[in-house]
Amino acid sequence: MFIAAILIALCVLILFGTPIAVALGVVAIGTMWIAVGPELLPIFIQRLYAGTTSFPLLAIPFFILAGNLMNTGGMTHRIFDVAHLMVGRVRGGLGHVNVLASMLFAGMSGSAVADAAGLGVVEIKAMKEAGYTGRFAATLTAVSSTIGPIIPPSIPFVIYGSLANVSVGALFLAGIVPGLLMGLGLMAVVALVAKRQNLPMGSARPAFAIAWRIVAAALPALALPPLVLGGILGGLFTPTEAAVVAAAYAFLLGTFWYRELPFAALPEILWESVRQTAQVMFIIAAAAPFGWVLIQQQIPNALLAALLGLSSEPWVILLIINAALLLLGMFIEGIAILIIAFPVLLPIMTTIGVDPVHFGVIIVLNLMIGLVTPPVGLCLYVVSSISNVSMAEITAEIWPYLLALIAVLGIITFVPELSLWLPNLLGYGVVR
């Protein structure tokens, strides 16, 4: 009963519009007071501070800054041009270009919102000019942006790795194959929709000289993913230092190579990066005492006993957890779910033998689907705003793509080797 009261109180506060961080803090304080008394309240301040002092969390502001610099510094439209050169000639070609461009951009920003807001402007404009409906362009842009935090680098993976004390490098590697599967799944849906709706054919292949100029212009931007991941795997820098390298590279490229990032734009970019970082870190800070309260009250153990009472089969428990996370993603922001659910679910995963790296991929993929699930999908609102397409139109169009993403989630959940074989192959991190 006490467990239910805690969770109900949290959900009620969130549904009534209370900021996530405030709701977490209020519930944590209330639980401490009721369960033990006011003498426990100093721990709240200690846990609040401790929640933000993990070294890997320093990567968050720099990956956010890198994404904002890329969107202003001329990298996004060059990535789009290369994707168009590769897959833009078939029927519905710009739909495939949309997905492939998101896969390429995913290796740079680590943020779905950065993909939707930055690359999305280029994608939607090009698709509308080519005769695609705004509804189709906006919907596909929203769902393809979910690949961003799966293919490394990834802000959610940094947060999860910090919370779970799991190698961020191993998590980055574990996200590569799932991210590719997401892209292939969305492309399959695009192919079916293109045939059914008789979408426009793509343009003919350009002359070799033109194609080479397009590739050459984009090569410096495309060098960022191997620079980041290669530096981590090669031991040149940590994931946290890789975020600094990514931000510095994006700044130098946009300012001195492409010359599309004026110094006058830097204050606004820096302020926006600070604002986004503060939002994320405030939630992380407030979630630390909340997670401590859950563990102190032995709530994970109680939920584990309840789940094992339903079934002792790991696949059944995973199915229930996926369904619960997808449901939560319809109403609560993804990072908040990650931080709320982590202290409850990780002990359960450990008990039933699920690798923590594999579970990291499962939970982050769930949260990305939540970003495009009505009624509170953040990427839906971002894309609706930049495309002038209503939420109702996007929601009506999105279901085939959601089914494809959920199918990929099922495959990744029940075939753990798809996530773990690459970290194991390269011997990076401790993966069971």
Image: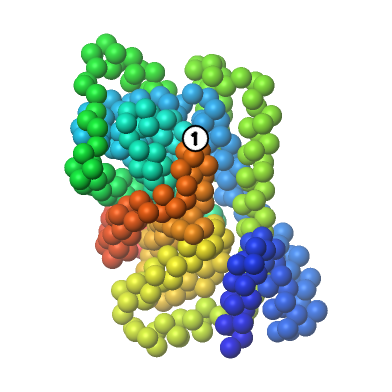
Q: Residue at x 80, y 79 (%)?
A: 38
Q: Is residue 163 above or below residue 181?
A: below
Q: Quadrant of residue 370?
A: bottom left
Q: Position of residue 240 (x, y in %)?
A: 55, 43
Badge 1 marks a residue whose secondary structure is helix
Amino acid carrying mark 1 in the image? Gly
Q: Position of residue 403 (x, y in %)?
A: 31, 58
Can residue 222 be spotted in the picture?
no
- The x, y position of residue 249, in whole percent, is 52, 27
Q: Is residue 81 above or below residue 17?
A: above
Using the rendered view, name the quadrant where residue 159 is placed.
Answer: bottom right
Above-or-below relation of 47 to 104: below
Q: Residue at x 32, y 28 (%)?
A: 130
Q: Is residue 328 above or below residue 418?
A: below
Quadrant occupied by the N terminus: bottom right
Which residue position holds label 1? 118
Front residue of 209/420: it is 209
Residue 209 falls in image quadrant: top left
| Of the pair 211 and 416, the residue shown nearer to us | 211
The structure residue drawn at horizontal position 45% and vertical position 85%, both measured from the top left corner, is 306
